[in-house]
Image (cartoon, rainbow, N blue to C red):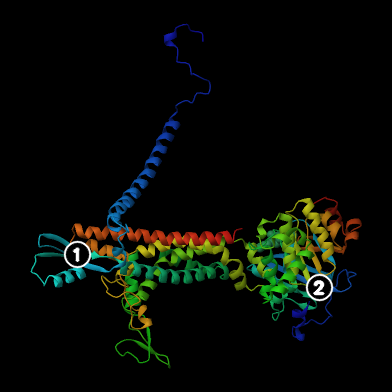
Amino acid sequence: MATQDVSNMEVPPPHPFMRPATAAMRSERRAFNVFRMATYSVLLAATAIFGVIFVKGADTIFTREFPFVNIAFLIESPETLHVFDHEGQHHEIGDREFRKYMEAHANPTIAEETYVYSAGGIFPCIVGTFFLVVGSMAIALFVGISAAVFLNEYSRGGRMVELLQLAILNLAGVPSIVFGLFGFGLFVLFAPIFASAPDPSHLYIPLGFGYLNFTGWGVSLISGWFTLAFMVLPVVITASEESLKAVPKGFREGSLALGATQWEAIRTNVLPYALPGILTSSILGIARVAGETAPIMFTAAYVVRDRLPWQVDHVLDVLFQGVMALPYHIYVVSSKIPQNAYTERVQFGTAFVFLGLVLGIALSSVILRNRLRARYRW
Amino acid sequence: MSSQLADMPSKIVNPPSIQPAADALPTPTPMIVVDHLDFYYGKSKALHAVNMNIAAKHVTAFIGPSGCGKSTLLRCFNRMNDLIEGTRIGAGEVRIQGVNIYDPTVDVISLRRQVGMVFQKSNPFPKSIYQNISYGLELQGVKDKKRLDEVVEKSLRGAALWDEVKDRLHSSALGLSGGQQQRLCIARAIAVEPAVILMDEPCSALDPIATSKVEELIQELKKKFTIVIVTHSMQQAGRCSDMTAFFYLGKLIEMDATQKIFTKPSQQQTEDYITGRFG
Ligand SMILES: Nc1ncnc2c1ncn2[C@@H]1O[C@H](COP(=O)(O)OP(=O)(O)O)[C@@H](O)[C@H]1O
Ligand SMILES: [Mg+2]
């Protein structure tokens, strides 16, 4: 530097590779921070939801004494809670216990308060949701995989296929309440039942050996299965198509060149490799089937039902009965009955169990998928 | 060996009168006869009036610049082109063991059992080595474990792979090296005892050592099978084929004994290609 005046000199950089603070750099840092905050907000929301449900639900589910789990909540039916003071003691007991108590004390007159569904447990809801998930996923997987195989393996493009693909895409955007109403109209009110005699009050078709009476399936498991199945079908079809596309063409050609029919090639050398992917994406469908309230509230769910699904007079009645379900129970106990400290216990307990169940189902599909994947890897 | 095709109703067997007119070749018994074949992908014509006889138990090599229709013709022999939408035979026919394989009465499944194929990109199934070989037989309904064991061993020996894999028959075929995988695909093809084996550039992804193993194997296989091999390597055609066919722009330019093609071809185009002037 020529000048001697130190005070006028710019501060020399400490080293020649010094990073200049340019505008681009500053805006980069700002953008980065926005992205970071957005990500953290997701984390915050998730923590809040899971945290509250976990902490409050754990109060209901876990106990301080052995066996540390509130087994009654998991294996009993909902009951009315009776709260009263008698002979100097405070009681909070369920309906059955209350009746025994009254008998034992020769039916005393007491001032009691009752709270519906706030005692007992949610066993019928767990069972009902389990039945709904298994049945509807079975239907959705069967129909969905078949459709994907048809679209991806057999059909040779064309307008028809384009139309189908469009329909599937649109089906995915239909709100679940619409599925619920659609299921109500089609399955609950209209679907046919086979019988030996015609039902003159409904449309019926004589088959020669019997009659199809269009009496509808009523609010029942089977109506719920089909409604839920149609709701997740787009997910399953799209997932299946993508998994099928991921299987190299060489496997199909290799099979065909050995004299396999197309179905043999698909069955032995395409589907087994696509299945892990199909299951993975269908996990998403499981969570939806288990969690949606709208599709089942008109088609399959009962507010309360004393009998469990297997307590039926006739085997076929299993299909034609309504069930209690976890999401619907949460809806009922949080909006259809007066709210108080006692109902909160059921709400959070149910939500806790519900999350646990979905997690459990998802986990077992992941395990199944990993097993399959280990067997067929390419 | 030829049972399925021989069982065809006799009326569809073509009268032997229609024989390819062009340069008749000194073939003892033609296994495959291509007769004025035109082939189309949609509107574009990929093969122009191809005539050729492919001798039984010989190795026939197809050479020619990329895109000249070698694979297309090869895939006509086991009707793999049927899988591609819009393909059709414009004129002419392909006869294998005297049967026009594009006759509507021909069952593609039994045709493909007679005409096996090895692909350019080796495609072992993601199953065990054993299952890869037994696959073709299981398709035919063979369940007898002893029979399957025998065929697996015989096929692997036939493909010069037995010694390398006999201790790990039940581990995944995908653990094999590239060359081994391609020989496994050959073993898989010979397990169903076809009459013809089609190979579409079987060595294009292999290193020189693996390539020479496959070439040795081809010499061994021609004792029992008719082999048609597409290759982009003229050295390979020279080393392992008896007959060589040179294609250019969808036309068969010349077909002759390999010796002759490489020493004194009768067509100028063939000579240009072989001497590396184009292609
Ligand atoms: N699936 C296909 N659809 C349309 N054209 C094709 C298809 N496969 C090959 N072709 C065309 O047919 C011609 C011959 O191709 P191909 O038989 O693969 O050549 P080669 O194997 O000699 O390199 C090429 O012009 C190619 O573009
Ligand atoms: Mg090719």
- Chain of the residue under the numbered disc 2 shown in the image: B
Q: Please indicate whether residue B257 sits to the left or right of residue B158 in the image.
A: right
Q: Amino acid at mark 2?
A: Val
Query: What percent of the width, then of the height, locates residue B256?
Result: 88, 64
Is the CB of mark 1 within 8 Å of ligand 1?
no
**Mark number for residue B125?**
none
Question: Which residue shows up at 31% across the image and 86% down it?
Answer: A202
Looking at the picture, tell me which residue is in the foreground, A231 or A10.
Answer: A231
**Residue linked to disc 2:** B33
Work out which residue is located at the far top of the displayed protein and give it. Answer: A4
Dot 1 alpha-carbon crowd within 10 angstroms: few under 14, some 14 to 19, many 20 or more: many
* Quarter the N terminus of chain B occupies: bottom right
How far apart, in angstroms, are the residues tagged by discs 2 and 1? 92 Å
Is the CB of mark 2 within 8 Å of ligand 1?
no
**Residue linked to disc 1:** A93
Query: What percent of the width, then of the height, locates residue A330?
Result: 28, 62
Looking at the picture, tell me which residue is in the foreground, A344 or B85.
Answer: A344
Dot 2 alpha-carbon crowd within 10 angstroms: few under 14, some 14 to 19, many 20 or more: many
Question: Which residue shows up at 82% across the image and 56% down it?
Answer: B236
Q: Is residue A101 visible?
A: yes
Query: What percent of the width, then of the height, locates residue A34?
Result: 38, 39
Task: Give SS at disc 1.
Answer: strand
Q: Please indicate whether residue A357 sits to the left or right of residue B161 in the image.
A: left
Q: Amino acid at mark 1?
A: Ile
Look at the numbered discs 2 and 1 and tell me whether their residues touch, using CB distance below 8 Å: no
Q: Give residue B52's quadrant in the image.
A: bottom right
Task: Give SS at disc 2.
Answer: strand
Q: Is residue B38 visible?
A: no
